[in-house]
Image (cartoon, helix red, strand yellow):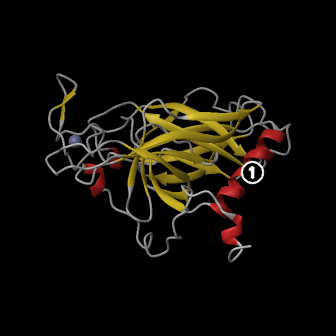
């Protein structure tokens, strides 16, 4: 049986609670399990199903209003395998511990809106950090990867490598290139950049971002910074490094129609010249 852990509740705005969870690492097939999110108005229930069955999903955004501060929502995660089922946590439930700050929430809402208007969308692949271990490249005994270029786990050692992709606006600014380096695939220059994202999806290091030109970036380890107001998350900032073309992350599929529906690139490298932009020399 799988064990659910790290159940967390977060408020991205005043109209929703985001419930996320993970599982203990396992060699079982996680697709054999169905997951349900349960909600109650009191710690000991009664708990009702709000979504499910989910398969290999670890996040659900529950559309509840947080305007009424007297209400507290408690959550549990239930997993079912054939006839067996278990609920986590077994006692009481998980709830939003800090009351969301309305000013911080409003700043986050405006920032998200600006991003949706001004910034083009990218494909974001959240990297897996838990779940089913890859038997192709992960050695149970030494707890090490034994080969690279693995298409089962994209070299993450977790089956699938990444969670389902999310399409959302991320502001990307190129900050420079490193000197050309030699590799088996010839010499290449690695681009560096900075990224910004609102509070509707939490980014983590080594997540993969795909732009409209199929440029692929990786979120640099240790670079994610959260901009907060009164502990409300407003936006996230992080460093990016371009993934070399031959790397296994280039085999991650891009959702249908993504390239066709792409906006033109943001020309954020070039400072706006208002005289030129106004239609000629003034
Ligand atoms: Zn693997």
Residue 164 located left or right of residue 76: left
Query: Could you say where residue 207 lies in the image, as x and y percent from the top left?
Result: 42, 44
Q: Name the residue rendered at 34%, 44% in the picture.
A: 30
- Relative to 44, is 112 above or below? below
Considering the numbered disc 1 on the image, is that residue within a helix, a strand or a loop? Answer: helix
Residue 20 located left or right of residue 258: right
Q: Which quadrant of the figure shows ligand 1?
A: top left
Q: Name the residue rendered at 48%, 38% in the picture.
A: 204
Q: Choose between 102 and 25: the one closer to the eye.
A: 102
Residue corresponding to mark 1: 109
Query: Could you say where residue 75 lies in the image, as x and y percent from the top left?
Result: 63, 38
Callout 1: CB less than 8 Å from ligand 1: no
Residue 47 visible in the shown view: no
- Furthest toward the front, the residue is 282
Residue 214 located left or right of residue 274: left
Q: Choose between 278 and 208: the one closer to the eye.
A: 278
- Relative to 168, is 78 above or below? above
Q: Quadrant of the N terminus?
A: top left
Residue 124 located left or right of residue 131: right
Query: Could you say where residue 51 lies in the image, as x and y percent from the top left?
Result: 57, 53
Q: Choose between 200 and 193: the one closer to the eye.
A: 193
Query: Could you say where residue 151 lies in the image, as x and y percent from the top left?
Result: 22, 50
Q: Quadrant of the C terminus?
A: bottom right
Q: Residues within 10 Å of mark 1 (few under 14, many from 20)?
A: some
Residue 106 visible in the shown view: yes
Q: Name the residue rendered at 32%, 45% in the picture.
A: 161
Q: Quadrant of residue 127?
A: top left
- Furthest toward the top, the residue is 142
Number of labels in the image equals 1
């Amino acid at each position: 049986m799988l064990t659910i852990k790290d159940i967390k509740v977060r408020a991205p705005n005043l109209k929703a609670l985001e419930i996320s969870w993970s599982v203990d690492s396992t060699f079982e097939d996680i697709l054999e399990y169905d997951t349900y999110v349960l909600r109650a108005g009191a710690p000991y229930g009664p708990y009702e199903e709000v979504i499910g069955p989910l398969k290999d999903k670890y996040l659900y955004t529950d559309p509840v209003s947080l305007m009424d501060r007297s209400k507290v929502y408690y959550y549990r995660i239930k997993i079912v395998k054939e006839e067996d089922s278990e609920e986590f946590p077994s006692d009481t439930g998980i709830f939003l511990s800090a009351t969301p700050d309305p000013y911080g929430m409003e700043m986050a809402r405006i920032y998200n809106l600006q991003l949706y208007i001004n910034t083009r969308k990218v494909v974001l692949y959240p990297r897996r950090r838990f779940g089913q271990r890859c038997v192709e490249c992960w050695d149970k005994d030494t707890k090490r990867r034994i080969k690279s270029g693995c298409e089962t786990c994209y070299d993450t050692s977790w089956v699938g490598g990444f969670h389902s992709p999310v399409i959302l606006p991320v502001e990307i600014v190129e900050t420079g290139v490193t000197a050309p380096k030699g590799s088996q695939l010839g010499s290449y220059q690695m681009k560096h950049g900075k990224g910004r994202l609102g509070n509707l999806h939490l980014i983590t290091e080594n997540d993969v971002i795909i732009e409209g030109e199929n440029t692929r970036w990786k979120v640099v380890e240790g670079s994610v910074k959260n901009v907060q107001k009164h502990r409300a998350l407003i936006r996230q900032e992080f460093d990016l490094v371009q993934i070399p073309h031959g790397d296994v992350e280039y085999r991650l599929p891009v959702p249908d129609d993504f390239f066709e529906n792409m906006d033109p690139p943001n020309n954020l490298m070039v400072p706006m010249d208002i005289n030129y932009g106004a239609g000629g020399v003034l």
